[in-house]
Structure formats: C-alpha cells, structure tokens
Amino acid sequence: MKKEGRAEKRNWKIIILGVLAVVFLALAINFTFLGERDCKDYECFKGAMEKCSKARYVNDAPEASWRYTILGEKDGACNIEVKLIQAKQGELGLEALMGYSMGCESRIGAAGYPEKNLENCHGRLKEELQGVMINKLYGYILQNVGKINESLSDFE
C-alpha cells in the first residue's frame, strides 16, 4: 500500500512538472517568435517595418515623442499604431494631442515614420494634426497676405 501511494505522488509530480515545462516552452516560443520586440533604435524599427513584424519603438524627436506599434499585416498592408506620448516645447501646439493615437498603413517593404504621410492614416490623432496644420497655414497666410498679394500681381 505504501509503495502504491508513493508511486501515485511521484506520478502527479511528473505530470505537474510536465505541464509546467509545456507552459514554459509555449511562453518562450510566443515571446521569441510571435510577441512584439522592443526596438531601441530606428534601424531596428525600420527592419521590423519592412518585414511587417510585430515591434514597438519610441521616437524621441525634438518636437514630440511618438510610440509606434507594428500590429502586423492585414489586407496586404502593414498596420501600425502611432501614439503621441509627449509633446515638447515648440511652436507646433501639440500639447493638447498627447495620448491620442491613429492607425496607419504602410506598404510591405517600405519604411519610414508613419505620421509624415497622413494620407495613409486614420483616427483622432490624424484629424487633430490636420487641424493644427490648417491653423498654422492660416496664420502664415494672414501674416504674409501683403507678400502673397504682390507675388500674385506679378502673374497679371
């Protein structure tokens, strides 16, 4: 009887260790091959974007810090989430947009900063960025209406 009880306990230990080994192996495979990798520089992000492999990258640009998350391929395009995580001092007026995000699509094999080409993006951040650009352009036109008028009169 005692030997049978010990054998049962040993079998349960082996089963538990086997299950733990399988779970550990599955997690290792997931993080190695399927999970996002954190890129520390643009070259890593560029390579991931060209292959459309899941990755994250923070671009700490002078005007703002942007977080890019490559979500993977969908409908033949590479899907990337862009989030404004910190607006910095400057004349761009991005402070009110912090925390907003947008989805962008990129051609497979191409690389670059998605927010530089807003026509391939959609979402609240895109709409707000376009509003900022329109306001800046409007201000420029108002400041330079005389110069613009002179330039246009040269064509008459």
Image (spheres, rainbow, N blue to C red):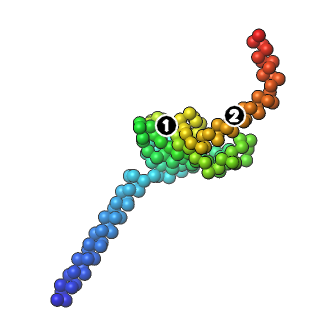
Residue 12 placement: quadrant: bottom left
Q: Residues within 10 Å of mark 1 (few under 14, many from 20)?
A: many
Residue shown at 30% from the left, 72% from the top: 17
- Residue at 78% x, 22% y is 148
Frontmost of labels 2 and 1 is 2
Q: Which residue in the protein does label 2 denote?
A: 134
Q: Which residue is mark 1?
A: 106
Q: Looking at the rendering, which quadrant does residue 142 occupy?
A: top right
Q: Callout 1, which amino acid?
A: Ser
Q: Is residue 25 left or right of residue 145?
A: left
- Tell me if I can see residue 10 in this picture: yes
Q: Nearer the viewer, residue 78 or 102?
A: 102
**Direction top: furthest residue:** 156
Helix, strand or loop under label 2: helix
Query: Within the image, what quadrant is residue 139 found in?
Result: top right
- Residue visible at 76% across and 17% down? 152
Does residue 85 show up?
no
Instruction: Pinpoint residue 56: horizontal percent, then vertical percent.
Output: 51, 50
Q: Is residue 112 above or below residue 152?
A: below
